[in-house]
Image (spheres, helix red, strand yellow):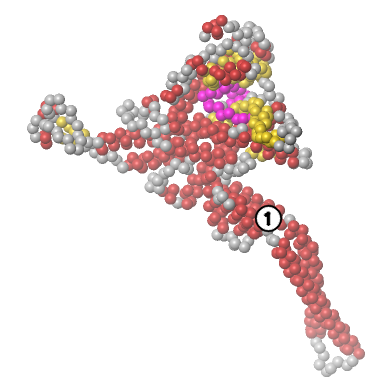
Amino acid sequence: MQDELIYNDPQSSLSAWVSDRVDQWESHRNQNYEKKWDEYYRLWRGIWASEDKTRDSERSRIVAPALQQAIEAAVAELAEATFGNDQWFDLRDDVADQDPSDIAYVRSILKEDLEKAGAKEAVNEILLNGAIYGTGIGKVITEETTEITPSEQPVQGTLTSVRGTIEETVVQVALEPVAPMEFVIDPTATSIDEALGVAHIVTKPRYLITKGINEGVYEDKPISAYDKVDFGFDDESAAPNADDKVKITEYWGLVPKKFLGKTQDTDFDYNSDELVEAVVTIANDSTVLRVVENPFMMKDRPFVAYQHDTVPGKFWGRGVAEKGYNPQKALDTELRARIDGLALTTHPMMALDATRLPRGTKFEVRPGKTILTNGDPRTVLNPINFGQMSQTTFQEAAELERMIQMGTGSMDTATSNSANPRNATASGMSMLQAASIKRQKRTLMNFQGAFLIPFINKTVWRKMQFDPTRYPVMDYKFTPSSTMGIMAKELEQMQLIQLLSLVKQDTPAFGILMMGIFENSSLTNRDQMMQAIQQGMTPSPEQQQAQQAQMQMQMQAAQIELQQGSADVQKTQAQTAKYMVDAQTKELPPIKIPEVEMAKAQLDLHEQEIRLQEKAAKVASMKMDTLRTVPEMEHLNSETALNIAKARRATVNGAN
């Protein structure tokens, strides 16, 4: 403390300007959200606190796990939908670029770098924060790290080698989960980019700050210990050593440009003074350790956030804990009242005539105990029974659990069939699942649009700026490749299985449905089964040759039939011509052929000519089919895969 009083910080104006606004934002956040967030956290952890009592006479401390299960179910659904596939995001190149190999390379190395930096674990924690507090926040951290890899190093002048290690400096971009209690934002803003600024307030070990000063990250200024650390209700850390802690306020946002220098001017006017994007790090609300303009090429702030459930016009969203808070409190009240009542109806109680007990007697009831009384024990002692517990409390508790389902959209919270008979029917469960899936999909869209895509954008920007050799500067387009959650997969499985009973086994549609069933399953040999089905749907080269031979035989038979028909027509024409000649040169028999028979003969001749033309057209068509057979067989695999994808997409749309 003495060092702070002696040292005069030349950037005190900047420190005062930033600290004043951050303190106001923090006070606004605490007044409106801090008490609620603490209670949401306790309900999720199952921790009882005295302020959670619903009545003064309440003795039980049970916390029902219904809300805990709803939170964990929501997080599991979002995590499964985001990371269910191996490829959990996609990159698209510009339409004018005809070479897709460059974007495929960047996608592969970006996925590898993110997973190596622990992005999946960080995203899961951020999803949990969003479900509990309503807002999930992450910080994109860019730092240089040293990677040590084993290698074989040859010994100079010999044919041998020794095992050693290679140290390589790499630029790592990681995602750090930020708890809402550690984040403040301008309350008039609805997004991070819109705000005047945001601040990350944490308490860090003092040795890390000293290390940063030695490495040149922070300015070398005297720092005192911070003795106002608040660890909440964690009794294990109730008395920390204040000498080891330093409060760090990292502000990212607009600041007056004139305060970036060493000036003692404290006046600021929005009309005349210029604001610039900068990062300001303040220790213990007074000492400025670092102040620089935003070092990133896109001048963006390294924070991303999403609302689990959107609250219009607010930055802070609504989580699962808030949606299920009221029925959870009612359920806890019901269970605690029942447990307190069980203590009165289960444990024996006695009414005593105190004047007829021996002096100094400490009355207790236990098996085998001898009780001394002055007089008849039947008149001195009287057991007291407060009645029996009502059985309706079980049904009331089940209804309260159903209310938690209604509020949170969770389908994992168990409700008995007696309390909710529709759970015993397949149609009722399908309706409930469909409604729950729609709510989960809405949250997933919020997460992807507000968090996942901006996070990947910022990551690639950092990589292009600080690691241009691996990440060339390009115009990338990002698309999240989320899958269906567990509940959506189960609902689609039921629909696919029902469709199997309507389709014949030897048809292509049957194979497509089987592909969809195995794709949604979690079998260990799923890929092998899908490959076997696809091979069964694709004809082998032997089958293709047999089909071509069969078509050739059919064409030859048609040609023979055509030739026979042509011969019959020629024979009929010759007979007709002969008859006409005989009619002109010879006398006809007394009985002449009627003119009707002559017309009939001409009509038969015309019909034969028509059939002959139809057969000729059929042979020509078969020839064309034979010419098209070979290229069609070559493209059969790709067409089959396309049909499978279309059927799969149609089934997913139907399920959703």
Decide: is 640 above or below 563.
above
Of residue 140 and residue 270, the one placed in the foreground of this image is 140
Residue under the image location 63 percent in, 49 percent down = 649
Give percent across and percent down for residue 205.
53, 20
Give percent across and percent down for residue 167.
67, 29
Point out the residue furthest to the top here.
6
* Residue 606 visible: no
Classify mark 1: helix, strand or loop: helix
Decide: is 346 above or below 603.
above
Judged left or right of residue 128, residue 398 is left
193 in magenta: yes
> In this picture, which residue range is highlighted in magenta?
173-201
Circle 1 residue: 640
Of residue 41 and residue 254, the one placed in the foreground of this image is 41
Residue under the image location 77 percent in, 39 percent down = 97
519 in magenta: no
Give percent across and percent down for residue 215.
64, 18
Give percent across and percent down for residue 116.
62, 35
Q: How many marks?
A: 1
